[in-house]
Image (cartoon, rainbow, N blue to C red):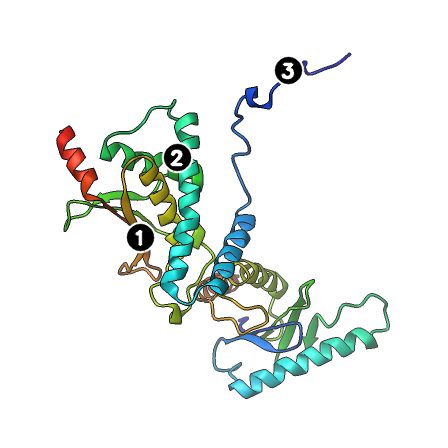
Amino acid sequence: MAAIYSLYIINKSGGLIFYKDYGSKGRMDTNDSLRVASLWHSMHAISQQLSPTTGCSGIELLEADTFDLHCFQSLTGTKFFVVCEPGTQHMEALLKVVYELYTDYVLKNPFYEMEMPIRCELFDINLTQAVQKDRVVLLGR
Amino acid sequence: MIGTGKIKQYANVLDKPLGKGKQEVSLSAFAFLFSELVQYNQTQVDNISELETRLEDAGYAVGARVLELLCHRDKGNRRETRLLGILSFVHSTVWKVLFGKVADSLEKGTEHEDEYMISEKELLVNRFISIPKDMGTFHCGAFVAGIVKGVLENAGFPAVVTAHFVPVEGQQRPRTTILIKFAEEVLRREARLG
C-alpha cells in the first residue's frame, strides 16, 4: 500500500517554509527537517551543474531502498518535495496540486510574507483534503 | 464587400450608449488586487480597528458608485423608499452584480428593532485569506461592509455596518455576517410611512 511519509516546501534560498509529516515513519524533529531541507536544496543545485545533459533543471526523483523522493521546482525556484514509500504512483500530480494550493491560499493571503514559514489555516485545511483524496484513490486501486 | 454593418459614429462621447461591459473578471486578479489593498493599508495604520476603518472607507466609495450604476441600469431609475425594498435590493441585485450570486440569507435581528443581518457561508473577498491568530477579530469583510454602507447611506438610509465571524457548530470555518444597524431617523420614517 502506497503511503506518503512527509511533505516539504523550501523557498528560493533553501530555507524550509513548510513541513508536514504523515505517519510515524517520516517523522523528524525541527532541526532534522531544517537540515534535510537545506541539504536537498544544495544537492538540487549541484545536480544542475553536474548533469551530463544540457538544460537540466535539477533532480526530479530520488529512489532509495526504503523511500522515494519526488521533487517539483516552480519557475520561481520554490521547491516542493515529498518523501514517500518506494513505488508510490502519481506523486508528480500531487505535487502539482500542492503547488496550486500554494498559489491560491498562501500567495493570495495578504498576511503572508514572502519566503517566510507558511502559517495559513486555509492552506492546511485544503492540503489535508487533497492528501486524503489522494489516499482514498490509492487505496481504492 | 463583406461587412458586419456600419458602426455608428457618435459625435459626442456622452451620446454613446452605456454598454453592460465585461460581466466577469478573473478571480485571481481580484484576489491579488485585494490582497495588495490590505497590505498597503497595513503599512499606513497603527492598529487593527484603523485598518478595518480604512477597508470600510474603500468599500464605501465602491458602494456609492454601484448604487448609481445599478439604479440606472437595472432598476430604470426608480428609487427605493422602503426599508425592506432597499435591503432586498442589496441582498439580491447588488450581491448578484458584485459576487455573481445572491447573498445566502437576510434576517431581521431578534434583539433590536433596528438590526438586520446578511449572512454568507464565505465572502468572496475572503476566499483565499487566512487571518493569523494574533489579529484577533479582524475581518477583511470590512470592505464588503463598507460597500453595503455606501449603498445604504447614498440611498437615504444611514446605517452602521460591520462584518463579523459567527462560529457554526459542525463546521471548521465560521460563517460571515454583515450586521446593519439603521439610524433612528430611518426607523421613524419607516414607522411614519406605515
> Disc 2 designates what residue?
B67
Q: Which of B11 and B77 is in front in this view?
A: B11
Above or below B142: residue A13: below
What chain does mark 1 sit on? B
Q: Is residue A1 left or right of residue B7?
A: left
Q: What element carries label 1?
A: strand
- Front residue of B84 and B56: B56
Q: What element carries label 3?
A: loop
According to the image, label 1 marks what residue? Answer: B162
- The image position of residue B14, as x and y in percent, is 56, 23
Label 3 and label 1: CA atoms lie apart by 47 Å
Percent position (x, y) of residue B192? 13, 31
- Position above or below: B192 against B35: above
Q: How far apart are marks 2 and 1 (CA)?
A: 19 Å
Horizontal relation, residue A57 to residue A40: left or right: right
Q: Mark 3 points at which residue?
A: B8
Pointer 3 or 1: first along the chain:
3
For the residues bearing labels 2 and 1, Cβ distance under 8 angstroms? no
Residue A4, image x and y in percent?
Answer: 54, 72
Amino acid found under the numbered disc labelled 3: Lys
Q: How far apart are marks 2 and 3 (CA)?
A: 30 Å
Please tell me which residue is depicted at 29% across the width and 29% down the height of the picture: B80
Q: Is residue A63 left or right of residue B176?
A: right
Asked if one can make out residue A6 in the rendered structure from this viewpoint, the answer is no
Residue type marked 1: Thr
Q: In this view, does A119 lie to the left or right of B84?
A: right
Neighbourhood count class around disc 1 (C-alpha, 10 Å): few under 14, some 14–19, many 20 upward: many
Chain letter for mark 3: B
User: Which of A21/B73 is in front?
Assistant: B73
